[in-house]
Amino acid sequence: MKRLRIGMISFAHSHAFSYYRELATIENAEVVAIADENRERVHSLLEHGHLSYYDDYRDMLKLPEIDAVIICSENVNHASMVTDSARAGKHVLCEKPLGVAIDEMKIMIEICSKYGVQLMTAFPCRYLPAVVETKKALERGDIGQVVAVKGYNRGTAPEGWFVESSLSGGGAILDHTVHIADLLRWLFKREPLAVYAEQGHLFHDLEVEDSGMVHIEFEQGMIAFIDTSWSRNRNYPFWGDMKLDIFGTEGVIHMDAFAQTNEVYSDLEDKARWSYWGEHMNYYMLQDFVDALVAEKGVPVTGEDGLLATSIALAAYESIQREGKVTMEQENEHEALDMK
């Protein structure tokens, strides 16, 4: 059996540790090297002994045995790491958001195409059982023509570089809009036309916004609204949610992606909590990535998908700055002017 040999670049994002654990269970994949400027951060992984370690990811990219890389760095470093990996001939799975500006994401996609490597964006929510069943119901036409969607992606406020705009590129709007935005495009096969948004500093004393309301006008008259916030405090029983209320001409679908939970009450815990027992979305996403590359097929979630989902979040920031609705054409024009 052909195995995909993988190098992991940066463990700045905690998802990297989850990806590493899931990859260990995938038969046709093998992590052979990791690169992180902070050796202490990955010390526990290096104790296994079979991994090559590099403090500079560009040295790791020189390894001929690596077929693909997974990038989980700070958001602002995605662009340089993706393009460096592409020039080294490595396929790429990049953590969301793909980038922090439209033009840089376009360059990332172009460079990957030029060097014949595939670029996949990490959108594991597509693999959640509730999301998959919702897609099937929509394809059957169970609720008729969809006219409106209300989305929720609320979570606990992160720490560290996530709340430093120079490293993250934004706050709750960028962090929590992109997952729902990708699902809206994927589920309904419609592209956004215009965005109106508002932001707030309601829950925490942070440099970046901790809350946002994003309204989106889609093709064929569909409208969507996203509550994107870090509104879950530390005492909440689960880190956050992923929900859609979908309103059609013949019915309504209520989708709760993390409803598969047990309620846990323990004397060892300071609070009651929900323990998620559902299927592992990261595993299925990674298996899809590996299988596509081994079979030399197109990856299921492309760089273009990452660009288009992130463009909605960036249009939200532009709307806030202009204090009004922004069309997607205006957002593209604004990005082009900023590059001149």
Image: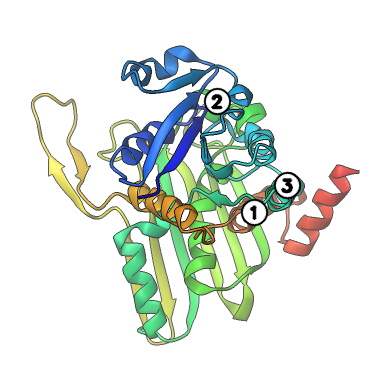
Q: Residue at x 29, y 37 (%)?
A: 236
Tell me the CA gap for discs 1 and 2: 22 Å
Q: Which amino acid does label 2 sit on?
A: Trp
Q: Is 180 placed left or right of 233 in the picture?
A: right
Q: Position of residue 241 (x, y in %)?
A: 36, 49
Question: Can residue 121 be seen from the camera position used here?
Answer: yes
Compared to residue 218, the image places residue 168 above or below, namely above
Q: Which residue is under mark 3? A: 111
Please identify the quarter of the rendering in which residue 126 is found.
bottom left
From this viewpoint, is residue 159 visible? no
**147 over 274 or under it: above or below:** below
Query: Which element carries disc 2, helix, strand or loop?
Result: helix
Task: Give the residue at x 52% y 27%.
Answer: 10
Question: Quick one: label 2, few (<14), some, or many (20+) residues within 10 Å?
Answer: some
Q: Which amino acid does label 3 sit on?
A: Ile
The numbered mark at residue 307 is 1
How many residues crowd mark 1 within 10 Å: few (<14), some (14–19), many (20+)?
Answer: many
Instruction: Measure the alpha-carbon separation of dots 2 and 3.
Output: 27 Å
For mark 2, what is the residue?
161
Question: Which badge, 1 or 2, is on the more N-terminal residue?
Answer: 2
Q: Where's residue 286, x and y in %?
A: 40, 48
